[in-house]
Amino acid sequence: MVQRGATTLTQVSTHLIWAYCGCGYAAPIDVARLLELPNPPLTVGDVVRRAKCRQCGAVGVSDFRLVWRCASDREA
Ligand SMILES: [Zn+2]
């Protein structure tokens, strides 16, 4: 079984990571945009552990979900 969060970002570059905070706030994180950073996080787990909630300021999410981004977003 695959360890949760061990997925590398390059494997899911066309996805959004929906991050859920314990306070009820949820926000989508665009993986493609993360990969454009000078030092991109390596895995999904790295991202969700560092994510900061915009509503309550808590670091780290209580749950997350990978969602395939709509193909119409992509050029090609
Ligand atoms: Zn929160």
Image (cartoon, rainbow, N blue to C red):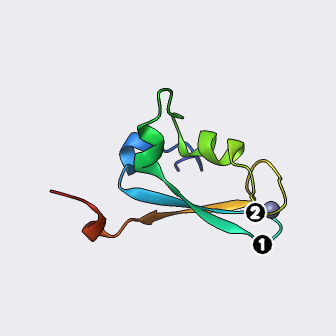
Image quarter for ligand 1: bottom right
For the residue with label 2, is its CB less than 8 Å from the closest atom of ligand 1?
A: yes
Which residue lies under the disc numbered 1? 24
Let me know if residue 32 appears in the view: yes
Distance CA(mark 1)–CA(mark 2): 6 Å
Q: Please give the count of numbered marks on the rendered protein.
A: 2
How many residues crowd mark 2 within 10 Å: few (<14), some (14–19), many (20+)?
A: many
Let me know if residue 8 appears in the view: no
How many residues crowd mark 1 within 10 Å: few (<14), some (14–19), many (20+)?
A: few
The amino acid on which the numbered mark 1 sits, given as a three-letter code, is Gly
- 65 is higher (above) or lower (below) than 42: below
Q: Position of residue 52 (x, y in %)?
A: 73, 50
- 28 is higher (above) or lower (below) than 60: below
- 18 is higher (above) or lower (below) than 31: below
Residue 21 — which label? 2
Residue 1 — which label? none
Q: In the picture provided, is 5 more to the left or to the right than 52?
A: left
Give whichever of 38, 4 is nearer the camera.
38
Q: In the picture provided, is 48 more to the left or to the right than 71?
A: right
The amino acid on which the numbered mark 2 sits, given as a three-letter code, is Cys
Q: Residue visible at 45% across and 43% down?
A: 9
Q: Position of residue 38 (x, y in %)?
A: 47, 27
For the residue with label 1, is its CB less than 8 Å from the closest atom of ligand 1?
A: yes
